[in-house]
Image: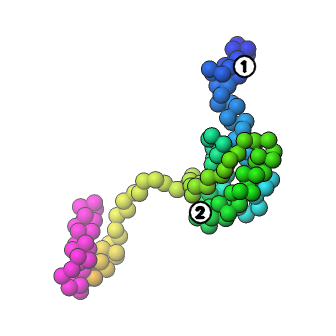
Amino acid sequence: MHNSIENFLTAEDGAGRLMAHARLLLKLAHIFADVVPAHLRDASQVANYRSGIVVIHAANGAVAAKLRQMGPTLANEFARRGLECSGVLVKVQAPESPSQSRTCEAKPLTEGARRELSGLQDRLPDSPLRSALATLLARSAKEK
């Protein structure tokens, strides 16, 4: 059993190619961590390697801009350490936090909020805002 799993993990037609790519990404990540200042390293990560290009995900635009400035230096350092690297591509890809939800949950209006919005609607002239408040209050009444 052990040999068959080991053969699968190392075989070119099995997971061997995937394992080799994972090892390469790990090596790139270690080099990246050595070269990049801590404040940038903490807000970015090596994401992929394709055709000689190292892809890095940055948490925000400011970090991405700084890493793009460092691109030639990073590419030279990867090449100096024995990896074929013709460039660095930096993308903004904020890490998803576990507490962050991709779906929003409708929360009912409290009675006090409903009263306040109703009073505001009554004071507003006929306008798109007044219509939007009327729609909001009507939907809120249905959800009750």
Image coordinates of residue 131 in percent, x first then y, are 21, 74
The residue stretch that appears in magenta: 121-144
Is residue 139 located in the magenta-colored stretch of the structure? yes
Q: Return the disc, 1 or 2, that comes first in the chain's sequence.
A: 1
User: SS of the residue at dot 2?
Assistant: loop
* In the foreground, 144 or 65: 65
Q: Residue at x 28, y 62 (%)?
A: 144
Image quadrant where one finds the N terminus: top right
Image coordinates of residue 31 in percent, x first then y, are 78, 48
* In the foreground, 140 or 67: 67
Residue for badge 1: 6
Image coordinates of residue 70 in percent, x first then y, are 71, 60
Within-10-Å neighbours for mark 2: few <14, some 14–19, many 20+:
some
Answer left or right for 93 relative to 124.
right
Q: Image height check: is 52 above or below 3? A: below
Q: Residue at x 46, y 53 (%)?
A: 102
The outermost residue toward the left is 126
